Every structure is written in C-alpha cells, then in structure tokens.
Image: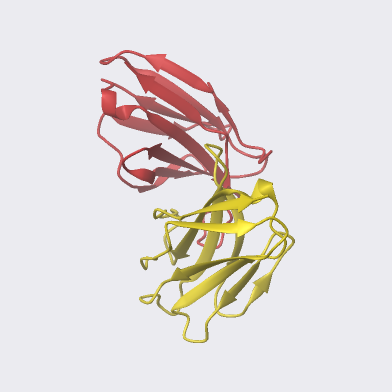
Chain colours: A red, B yellow
Amino acid sequence: DSGVTQTPKHLITATGQRVTLRCSPRSGDLSVYWYQQSLDQGLQFLIHYYNGEERAKGNILERFSAQQFPDLHSELNLSSLELGDSALYFCASSFIAGALDEQFFGPGTRLTVL
Amino acid sequence: DAKTTQPPSMDCAEGRAANLPCNHSTISGNEYVYWYRQIHSQGPQYIIHGLKNNETNEMASLIITEDRKSSTLILPHATLRDTAVYYCIVRGGAQKLVFGQGTRLTINP
C-alpha cells in the first residue's frame, strides 16, 4: 500500500460524458502527478501540481483539466469523452517537486468509455 | 531526458538472480537512472535509483557502468511475485517520469 488513494476504482460511462477522478496523496506529500496508461500509448505523464499550483503539463488534452485543492487532494476532470479515452489513470505523489523525489503511485482508476 | 532501451521480455527461474539491462547512451552528467516496476495493472512501484555509483537497497541492486551509458538492475533471489514490467527511466531536471515500453520479466517456478 503506497498511501495514495484513488476513487473510483472503476468507471464506465458513455461517449460525450464528463467524469471526475479523485486522488488523495500520501500524508505530507505536496506534489501530485497524473498519468494515463492506455494499451497503445503506454504510461504517459499528464500533469503535475505542487501545493495547489500547476507545475508542468505533459500530453494532456484540452478536454482534460485538473486541480489540486487546499487539502492537497487532486481531481482530474475528463469531458466530452471519446472511446480512446478508455485507459487506466494513475495518480502519484511525492513530498516536494525535485527530480530526486520518489513518486508513490495509487492503485489507479480504470475508465471505460462505451 | 535521455532515452532508454530495454529488451521487451526476459525469463528467470525462481530463486535465481534476475539481471535486467538498460541502455542509456545519451545520458548526460546530471541525469539519474531510476527503476520502477508495474505488477499486472497496479500502480508503478519505485525500486531504486543511482547517479554513477552502484546502489543497493532491500529490493535490488543497481549497477551503472563507468561511462554511465548502461546499467543493470539485479533482483538477487527472484520470486514469483517479482513477475512484472520493469521500467528503466533516465531523469534529469524534470519532475515527470517518462516511461518507455519496459521489460516484461517472467519468473518461472
């Protein structure tokens, strides 16, 4: 158990819908990262937040957005969903935001878009 | 961040040492080598990291060549629970992790 929690575990929805994935980092961790793992693209970095502020963006679509709240939990919002958005979404956390930080990953949310 | 090359798959017998190679010939002086693994569809798990010296922890050992162009992750006594995809990642100033295709390691009884 990494100490990072993600809800829900599974999500099934239809194309065009909007969903919110939630992540609670390990106690004391200030950084939250989101990654997407699909069959064809592998594990890809989406976005990084540190203490409520966006720090870096990766291959995140404009239909996707994220935020980190004052209590440090984070939400990833996915809208106008397409079949290709079906994937595992992982959240990771680390204490600060340095390159040497070990990232602890949550169990993931499996999103299925029908 | 430098690119890495790993064999797509490897097999190892239970109880033997598993040696997973990684090439990172374009690594620069301030970039670290990290290893993560992903068991089935669980979240990736940190294993070890190093800059130029060999490193060892309770999970594994990391051997980095003197020219730093390649490294080997060693699981000294592999168990069935070590069956996973192992990712070698070279990391410099960016906080993000850039995952390649990794090596699918299968531990056989």
Q: Compared with residue B19, is residue B107 higher up or lower down, i.e. above or below? A: above
- Across and down, in percent, residue B68 comes to 48, 80
Q: Quadrant of the N terminus of chain B?
A: bottom left
- In this rendered view, identify the residue nearer to me: A4 or A83: A83
User: Does residue A88 sit above or below B68 in this rendering?
Assistant: above
- Which residue is painted at 43% across and 63% down in the image? B6
Q: Residue furthest bottom?
A: B66
Give coordinates of residue B72: x percent, y percent: 55, 71
Q: Residue B64's quadrant in the figure?
A: bottom right
Measuring from the top left, give residue B90's x and y in whole percent.
Answer: 45, 65
Q: Residue at x 42, y 57 (%)?
A: B8
State the residue at coordinates (52%, 86%).
Answer: B66
**Quarter-wise, where is residue B2 in the image?**
bottom left
Residue B9 shown left or right of residue B56 in the figure: left
Q: Residue furthest front?
A: B109
User: What x and y, as percent, mark residue A2?
Assistant: 66, 41
> Can residue A85 be seen by looking at this rendering?
yes
Is residue B45 left or right of A99 when viewed as pictured? right
